[in-house]
Image: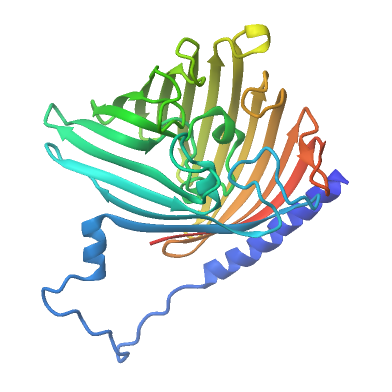
Amino acid sequence: MKRKFLAVGMAFMICITVGARSWADEAAPAEAKPDEAKPAAAPAGAPTLDDIKKLLGLSIYLQGGYTYNFEGSSVNNERIFDQKANTFLIDLAEIQFQKDPAVGGVGFKLKVSAGETAKYIHASGLGNTDQPFDLTEAYISYVAPLGQGLRFDFGKFVTFVGAEVIEARDDPNYSRSFLFNYAEPLTHTGLKAGYTFSEKVNAAVYLVNGWDDFDDNNNGKTVGLSVGYTPIEQIALNFNFLYGPEIPNDNADNRFLFDWVGTLKPVKDLTVILNTDYATEQHSGPDGSTGKWYGISGIAKYDFSKPFSLSLRAEYFNDQDGLRTGTVQQLSEITLTPEIRLVDGLLLRPEYRHDWSTQPVFPDGDNQPTKKSQNTIALGIMYTW
């Protein structure tokens, strides 16, 4: 039966990819004829929509899709952002205002999110998790005129760890990895200080409430360090650390995370992204031992042409004490995602994904966790304005 699911999934991917790629390669904007009427120009001195958009740093992002679970289940277990199956969804609707500060100047970023994804990215102490709205980022920036500019950010911002982000548009795949779902935080609230030493080296330090805590759940604070190193244009390496108490009302037992991301471009059209995480938490394992979780993922994306790319992700995540997923298990997945860039700002991503675990955590047709694997196909649509 599993082979049948795999065959059907691959057939779906091939058919939709070939058809969409053929359309994208052939569909090109027609050249205007000399005698065609042109739109009237705006009055001299009047601000255009682009002027207003640039002045406000305004952007709008919309993301939606459909995921089909081969077992007929309405839930994709062990997923976070794409939990729901067999229904059309508006995953994410974002509006953002941003101003990047110059040296000696002040800037800001404000990002508000709505949709299914907004339910899963709520920071503790910021609203009801059942509501599909989220204040995802809200911070003030100041660049002190020291050297090349010492930048400070204060407020709520997305995490600096990991290879993926909340918006699927900026990831190679439509769905997120287990590492993004379980091994890493999503957001922080606090203070960041960052400095670019050269074209090859940059670093930032953080003092924050913790992992996904808008309102701290104890009296301790979490410290973070991020170091970026780009030895050559084709290699970018990021080393990230977090350390601090994360258990509610517990200031003594600390959580440690080491996160490494390597981005490689061995040839012009190929990008390889590697990500590994290793985390421990004091007195949270069996019999008061130190709990652990760790994993590794790899993504390869190849640009075949301007409108078409193909990404393959594989990963392994070990939740050896059940601290992150609620089950002592080892999770793995492989995901194949074509990308078709239809027009400016519009992306189409069909996707096939196969998940498996050492425990029966995946649902059957009655939504009961009786299976050790699941297969899904999805179609994601993303637009940025």
332 in relation to 205, above or below: below
Residue name at image x 60 percent, y 14 percent: 284
Please provide percent x and percent y for residue 259.
48, 24
Please provide percent x and percent y for residue 225.
36, 21
State the residue lying farthest toward the right: 1
Q: Is residue 101 visible?
A: no
Please provide percent x and percent y for residue 176.
57, 42
208 in relation to 356, above or below: above
Q: Is residue 358 rendered to the left or right of residue 230?
A: right
90 in relation to 80, above or below: below
Q: Nearer the viewer, residue 225 or 265?
A: 225
Residue name at image x 58 percent, y 63 percent: 21
Residue name at image x 60 percent, y 58 percent: 89
Q: Nearer the viewer, residue 216 or 168?
A: 216
Q: Is residue 103 rendered to the left or right of residue 345?
A: left
- State the colouring used for the structure image: rainbow
Please provide percent x and percent y for residue 100.
23, 45
Q: Tell me the quadrant of the picture where the C terminus can be found.
A: bottom left
Q: Nearer the viewer, residue 197 or 193?
A: 193
- Count of marks placed on residues: 0
Q: Is residue 288 visible?
A: yes
